Every structure is written in structure tokens, then in C-alpha cells.
Amino acid sequence: MGTVCVEVAVRDDARLVDAAESLAAQARPPDRVLIAASTVTPEPLLAEARRRLGAIAVDVARFPGGVVDARAGALGLIHEDTTAFLDSDERAPRDWLVQLVAPIEAGTADFVGGPTRPVRPPTTSIERYSVLLEESIYRDLVPRSVTYVPLQNTAWRTSLLRSLGFDPRISFAEDHDLETRAARAGARGIFLPDAFVFHDQTDETNFYRWARKRYRYLVAMAMSLMKNGALRGRLEERRAPVRHPLRYVEAMLKPFALLSASIRWRRERARTARRPSGR
């Protein structure tokens, strides 16, 4: 077996402690855990996470910005053979890591993803919609293309991950952009339904915060699709609708998100064209 690093991105989230505890209980513990923390994450929280990880080697790196910035910034600090991603609002079952990295170590895959399951039955309307939306992604989109697997439950051959890097222009949909570029480079990606993690979305209670978060994601996803020449195909896809009233809110957000993404992507392309080393 090779070496494995699990990167946990966090921005002032007390659920980091539960994520750390779940990693300490793995049937195959990681060789190292790298906590990629935003600068606003309090030190006592990080200290408790270290304590919960027990004998596992732990490094903490701080980065300005949010989770996406921390995740991208930490990439240069990973030297293990395989890199796995877990977010601070997730908990990994005991056999998660051994299942997720097995295809990479067997040489049958270059990156692997698994699904999420709710940590408990949803109790609010927003939480219920978020759970249904994730279920539809793993049911309808991921089987068509592994490029739709959210990064927060994936493992990568580290050399591939570092060769691709993250495109700072595609924030909040960096997983789709990364996986699309990996697939086009000939990397083998597979989806493992049994390599699931529990996703805690119990903080999804504020409508404005939820709508803002969804809008930012829709803009970023549209930019990734434009960058990778996949927008037309995505618009022509047919998915079973998520049966929840909030899908109508999201449907109203999409045209504005698409327009914003189009303007922003044209600006980014122009800005990149003026730089000699833009990705």
C-alpha cells in the first residue's frame, strides 16, 4: 500500500471535530491528515480536532478566504501517494478510506468518488431540498459522467492532482472543472456507491443564505461548463425534477446565473489572455 493524506477543508465549523473523530476510527487510518483552515477558524477548534485524531500525524495550514481557497492553497503541501478529500461537515464510516483508495492503489483508477448520505432525516424545508438535490446528483448526473462527483468525497492519485491543479477562476465549482480536465487528459475516474460519507446539512435553515449559496454555485458551474465547452450539452440534458417547491426558486435563479457567468467568463478570458502564463 502507498501513503494516503486526507485533506479536510474548514472555515470556522465546529463539526470539524466529528469529521476528525471519524477519521481516527477508520479501518485504514490515513498516514496524515492535513487540515486546510481559513484564517477565521479558531485555534481551540483546531486543537480539539488534533486531539480527536489521536496518533495520526496532523498538519494545519491556514489560508485567507473560504474553503475553496484553503483547499487549493493546501495542494502544494501534500506529498503522499494518494490524496483524499473530506469536508468538515462530513463524517466518514469506518470502511470509507479503505474502499475509496483501493482502486487507485490497484491501478484501476486515477480518481475515485463516492456519494453522500444525510447524517439524519431532514427537519427543515431547506435541508430537505438540499438532501433531495444531492440524491438527484448521484442518481441522475454522476452515472452519466464522473465529472459531476462533488470533490468532498473523492480520492486522487496525488501526482495527477498536482499536475492539474485548481483553476482560481472557477471557484465553488472547482470539482467539476478539475474532474473534466482530468477525464479529458485520459485519467480514469470511477464512482463507488458504497464509499459514502454522512453529510451534515442541519445548518441549512436561512433562506437568504441558502439562495445566495445556490446562486454562487450556479454561476461557478456555468463558468466551468463554458470553459470546458460543455454548456450546450448540459442545457440539453434531461433530468427528473427534484420534487420540492424550492426547485422553482432555483429555476428562477438560473437565467440570472447564466447571464452573470457569461459576463464574468468573458472578463476572465480577456484577463487571462493578457497574462503570458494563464491556465
Image (cartoon, rainbow, N blue to C red):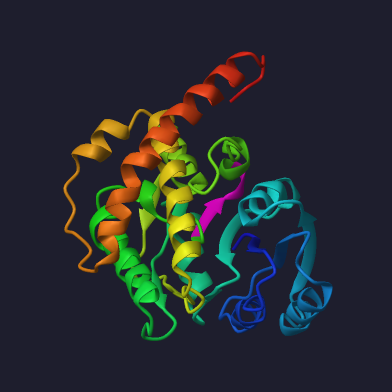
Judged left or right of residue 72, residue 132 is left
Q: Is residue 186 visible?
A: no
- Residue 146 spot, x, y in % from top left: 35, 50
Judged left or right of residue 34, residue 134 is left
Q: Quadrant of the C terminus?
A: top right
Q: Is residue 113 shown in magenta?
A: no
Name the one closer to the observer, 73 or 76: 73
Judged left or right of residue 102, residue 14 is right
Q: Kindly indicate the quadrant of the structure image that contains residue 84.
A: bottom right
User: From the viewer's perspective, is residue 79 above or below residue 1?
Assistant: above
- Residue 187 spot, x, y in % from top left: 44, 40
- What kind of secondary structure does the magenta stretch mostly adopt? strand
User: From the viewer's perspective, is residue 27 above or below residue 227?
Assistant: below
Magenta span: 154-159
- Residue 51 spot, x, y in % from top left: 78, 83
Residue drawn at x 56%, y 66% as measured from the top left: 86
Name the one closer to the observer, 251 or 190: 251
Q: Is residue 158 shown in magenta?
A: yes
Name the one closer to the observer, 142 or 3: 142
Q: Is residue 137 visible?
A: yes
- Residue 178 spot, x, y in % from top left: 49, 42
Residue drawn at x 64%, y 83% as measured from the top left: 21
Residue drawn at x 40%, y 45% as measured from the top left: 188
Q: Tell me how many marks there are.
A: 0
